[in-house]
Amino acid sequence: MAVDSAISSPLGPPACEKDAKALRFIEEMTRNAGAVQERVLADILTQNARTEYLTRFKLNAATDRESFKSKLPVITYEDLQPEIQRIANGDRSAILSAHPISEFLTSSGTSAGERKLMPTIKEELDRRQLLYSLLMPVMNLYVPDLDKGKGLYFLFVKSETRTPGGLLARPVLTSYYKSEHFKTRPYDPYNVYTSPNEAILCPDSFQSMYTQMLCGLHDRHQVLRVGAVFASGLLRAIRFLQLNWEQLSVDIETGDLNQKITDPSLRECMAKLLKPNPELARFVRHECSKESWEGIITRIWPNTKYLDVIVTGAMAQYIPTLDYYSGGLPKACTMYASSECYFGLNLNPMCKPSEVSYTIMPNMAYFEFLPHEPNSSGFTRDSPPKLVDLVDVKVGKEYELVITTYAGLCRYRVGDILRVTGFHNSAPQFNFVRRKNVLFSIDSDKTDEAELQTAVENASQLLREFNTSVVEYTSYADTNTIPGHYVIYWELLIKDAANSPSDDVLKQCCLAMEQSLNSVYRQGRVADNSIGPLEIRVVKNGTFEELMDYAISRGASINQYKVPRCVNFTPIMELLDSRLISAHFSPGLPHWNPERRR
């Protein structure tokens, strides 16, 4: 157990009194995790006692764990969809929460191809802000003097819409950046951004990125840390600089802003900042015109101490590229959060990416853990699972996260698989293993095996008139390109060589696959430019037989062998590419608009 944290903290010496208060709070919450969890559950059940959902399960205003666990089922999004649809359609009665639903947060996970809608209440913004306020006090324990400069963070708002009942539906970070908590945040010398609010809040992604990059170049000697939410986002910013450094240099040299920046508030804001600086323009041209971009981050921003990006889970695939552009700078993963709930933070943010563990903060929600058995057949209502409380998880075991929130989610399966790595006081620390059922991902998209299968089936319809079919397929997320893109390997059975599908037909197959993928993928292609055109690589006949032979040579059972629907093992990809016949890219953009299907 931790020692008393009266002035200092067991975590380390705080940088200032404000930090000391935050570190003491972390110690208090984690020392008393069991009691805090009990209180949180009682608060949630008391607050929502008269809601339709809790009344349905005859909880009768009980607030104890035993009644809660015995009467309320463990659920998924699909179980809750009727209630969510009623709220979206304008029903303002206390269905899930006694407090009014203020908006929906759109999840990167999907249901029936559409983003999931997560109900939230205004009070949740305070809880999210509280977790944000703990990040820099922890970082200051590891990196000194962060109050002596700025952070270059590429932050963006995304499209939002309204439900039929008039509620906003938007991503959680868009909600936060547009809130007064963010827009009118008090000055904090440890948390100063190079990007003005006007640039972050500009809805046009080009104008937003352009002006944020311009501000970052302007303040290049003051930048102490560089970041984005995801690793893929930071790499997109580097790619943007590769494509636009010449025009950025012109703006810096002349002090005149690119005419493509048309947002009035953004032009007004940048006019106050931008002054002619021929010396800086020469420097940018000199560095960016070099053939090699290795170490470009530290070449342009020489005082950068670390990168602040998520590189756990699917984002780990970007680590080698980040190392190339940054010269191997440390990568800090600071917090663990989702649209449903903010969960916790990394108390050792400068650790290696492979060692990242998040400490769950027990005041954020009520947490339960479903033991994860990869080969189990799941559970039914007749054989409910035995969930484990926060303080009772076992080191080394894997669990699926289940949450109960103030906004009305009760025993909701988030879908994240976590592995317990240890404890900080009585609060467990978890390594993020993966999203359940996700096959592969480039950015915030998540594609599962069933979706990929449907996309292949739909695209292969275009081959019928050529008497051709897809014999076998697999895929991988190619992150060597910026932005990354999906690669699908097809082995085709062509029954009439004289009438085989042309390059144009196979390109249309690429587009048909993209049309079949979920709305998060399509938004990444159309609006966010975070995903590149899908590619189909046609391989020689017999390639997948060779793939099976290779797997068997490495110990796979011939009786149980199944073609992997996603590959990321270099020798396998080399085998596939060595049998390549042709490659085809999607010729256009799939259909997407911010309005949800009714």
Image: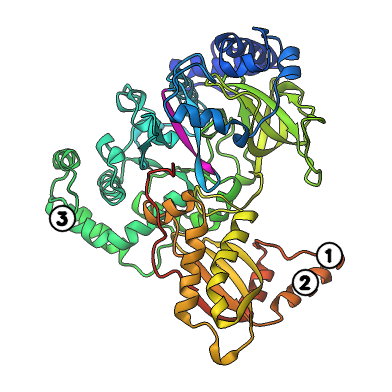
Please name the amino acid that badge 2 sits on: Met
> Which of label 1 and label 3 is nearer to you?
1
Q: Residue 347: x percent and y percent? A: 59, 30
Q: Are marks 2 and 1 in contact (CB under 8 Å)?
A: yes
For label 3, the residue is: 253
Circle 2 crowding by C-alpha within 10 Å: few under 14, some 14–19, many from 20: some
Q: Residue 309: x percent and y percent? A: 49, 43
Residue ID at (51%, 77%): 583
For label 2, the residue is: 548
Please name the amino acid that badge 3 sits on: Glu
Residue 39 location, quadrant: top right
Dominant SS in magenta: strand
Residue 144 appears in the rendering: yes
Answer with mark 3 or mark 2, whichever residue precedes in sequence.
Answer: 3
> Which of label 3 and label 2 is nearer to you?
2
Please determine whether, in this image, residue 350 is positioned above or below residue 41: below
Question: From the viewer's perspective, is 244 left or right of 555?
Answer: left
Residue ID at (16%, 43%): 267
Circle 3 crowding by C-alpha within 10 Å: few under 14, some 14–19, many from 20: some
Please determine whether, in this image, residue 198 is positioned above or below residue 571: above
Give whichever of 286, 318 is nearer the camera. Answer: 318
Please determine whether, in this image, residue 340 is positioned above or below residue 58: below
Q: Which mark is residue 556?
A: 1
Task: Find numbered disc 2 in the image and state the secondary structure of the residue it sits on.
Answer: helix
Please determine whether, in this image, residue 203 is positioned above or below residue 141: below
Task: Find numbered disc 1 in the image and state the secondary structure of the residue it sits on.
Answer: loop
Q: Does 106 lie within the magenta span?
A: yes
Q: Which residues are magenta?
A: 102-110
